[in-house]
Each structure stands twice: as structure tokens, then as C-alpha cells.
């Protein structure tokens, strides 16, 4: 999964969409493997954020209880994330992106959240 470039009439942004939580019902043979795959896709977005300037989880200074899933490949801490969310700090306060939401990296380096319907109405692919 790679970040794509999108544009409005006035600005170009980079964005990634949190995958929809499409796991089968609990108890289904594929429930756990689908959850792991979903978590990997969400983690890719958290890593992308750190690689593009987000400072991860600066408030969590004690990382002794963390495991490798809490860090980007460069060793930086990731924003809080799970199977269907990413929570992160921005100039707008604490933001919580949920399944299906878009995380936008503005031209000024600010990460924001955009609901899918607003994103579709506002942006078009720029790198097609």
C-alpha cells in the first residue's frame, strides 16, 4: 500500500485511507488472520505518518513495555493505533481516525482527518 497524491482546486495533499474493518464474524475460521492483515495495513499508515514528519507518541516517554509493533523501522515511536483506528496529536488537538477515514498530509506538513464522503467531494487523484 502506498500513499497517493490528490488535489483540490487550490492545493495538493498526500493521503492514505484507513481500511474498512471487513473482518468476518467472530468465530469464523478467518477472523484472526483477517484481523492481523487489517492491523498490518493500519500500521503501514502509522509508519507513513512518522516517515513524513509526525512525531509519533511524544507523551509516552517510557517505552520499556512496548514491542516492535509500537515503532517505525527508523526506531521512532508510532502514533497510537489498532485494528480500526489511529489516534494522534495535531495542532487541532487529539485526532482519532476510524475505519474508512482518510489521513491527510497537507502541503504545510500538518496531518488531518477527513471523512470519506467529504474526501470524495473535495479531492481528485493528481498522480493518475
Image: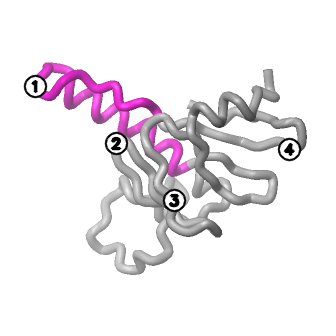
In this orientation, does residue 9 appear? Answer: yes
> Percent x, y for residue 115?
57, 40
The residues tagged by marks 1 and 2 sit, at their Cα atoms, a distance apart of 17 Å
The residues tagged by marks 4 and 1 sit, at their Cα atoms, a distance apart of 46 Å
Q: Which mark is residue 95?
A: 3
The tag earlier along the polypeptide, 1 or 2, is: 1
The residues tagged by marks 1 and 3 sit, at their Cα atoms, a distance apart of 32 Å
Quarter of the image where the N terminus is located:
top right
- Read off the magenta span: 19-47
Which residue is painted at 14% across and 20% down in the image? 28
Mark 2, secondary structure of its residue: loop
Q: Name the residue under label 2.
A: 83
The tag earlier along the polypeptide, 1 or 3, is: 1
Which residue is painted at 51% across and 53% down in the image? 73
Q: Mark 4 points at which residue?
A: 11
Tags 1 and 2 touching, CB below 8 Å? no
* Mark 3 surroundings: few (<14), some (14-19) or many (≥20) residues within 10 A: some
Comparing labels 3 and 2, the label whose residue is closer to the camera: 3
The tag earlier along the polypeptide, 4 or 1, is: 4
Tags 3 and 4 touching, CB below 8 Å? no
The residues tagged by marks 3 and 2 sit, at their Cα atoms, a distance apart of 16 Å
Q: Nearer the viewer, residue 2 or 111?
A: 111
The tag earlier along the polypeptide, 3 or 4, is: 4
> Percent x, y for residue 128?
79, 20
Q: Mark 1 points at which residue?
A: 27
> Percent x, y for residue 43?
44, 45
Mark 4, secondary structure of its residue: loop
Q: Answer whether residue 117 is magenta in the image.
A: no
Q: Nearer the viewer, residue 95 or 78?
A: 95
- How has the structure been colored for display? one colour
Quarter assignment of residue 109: bottom right
Amino acid at each position: 500500500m502506498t500513499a497517493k497524491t490528490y488535489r483540490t482546486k487550490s492545493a495538493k495533499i498526500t493521503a492514505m485511507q484507513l481500511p474498512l474493518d471487513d473482518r468476518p464474524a467472530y468465530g469464523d475460521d478467518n477472523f484472526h488472520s483477517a484481523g492481523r492483515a487489517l492491523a498490518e495495513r493500519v500500521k503501514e499508515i502509522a509508519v507513513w505518518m512518522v516517515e513524513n514528519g509526525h512525531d509519533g507518541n511524544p507523551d509516552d516517554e517510557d517505552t520499556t513495555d512496548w514491542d516492535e509493533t509500537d515503532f517505525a523501522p527508523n526506531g521512532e515511536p508510532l502514533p497510537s493505533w489498532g485494528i480500526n483506528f489511529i489516534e494522534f496529536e495535531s495542532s487541532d488537538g487529539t485526532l482519532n481516525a476510524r475505519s474508512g477515514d482518510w489521513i491527510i498530509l497537507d502541503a504545510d506538513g500538518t496531518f488531518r482527518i477527513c471523512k470519506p464522503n467529504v474526501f470524495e467531494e473535495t479531492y481528485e487523484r493528481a498522480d493518475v
